[in-house]
Amino acid sequence: MNSTPNANRKHVAIFGKTNAGKSSLINSICGQEIAIVSKIAGTTTDPVFKAMELISIGPVLFIDTAGLDDKSEVGKLRIKKTKEMMKRTDFALYVMDVNN
């Protein structure tokens, strides 16, 4: 199953506001440091991908995305890329900060 092309995998994307914990979640799920985690808002600029095998599902592609609430000029580009990932998503996880 490791040779399964990404296009043939179920796409599991992680969405949410900036600094909600999306990158921390993907790192935890994968058991690796796939995405950079920082207290600085907007650290994730481009989608981060990790192909894995889940016993109950089979081949999946996890996608970490930028925050959906970035108001900066560059943030508009980040949000555009994130929305593009929504079109490729088979299963979406929405992460919320407990303080929001």
Image (tube, rainbow, N blue to C red):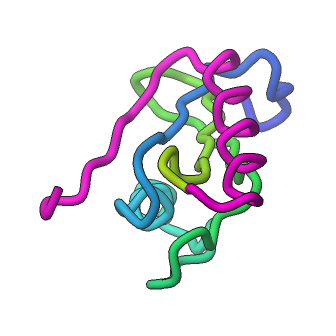
- Check residue 89 for magenta coloring: yes
Where residue 61 appears, as percent x and y from the top left, is 65, 35
Where residue 43 appears, as percent x and y from the top left, is 62, 73
For this view, does 46 lie left or right of residue 35?
right
Residue drawn at the location 26% of the way across and 49% of the way down: 96
Residue lying farthest left? Answer: 99
Residue 34 shows up from this direction: no
Q: Quadrant of residue 71?
A: bottom right
For this view, does 65 lie left or right of residue 92?
right
Where residue 14 appears, as percent x and y from the top left, is 48, 41
Q: Check the image and report above or below for 25 versus 13.
A: below
Q: Check the image and report above or below for 34 versus 63.
A: below
Q: Which region is colored magenta?
A: 71-100
Quarter in which the N terminus is drawn: top right
Where residue 26 appears, as percent x and y from the top left, is 48, 56
Residue 35 shows up from this direction: yes
Q: Check the image and report above or below for 5 versus 42.
A: above
Residue drawn at the location 69% of the way across and 19% of the way down: 88
- Check residue 51 for magenta coloring: no
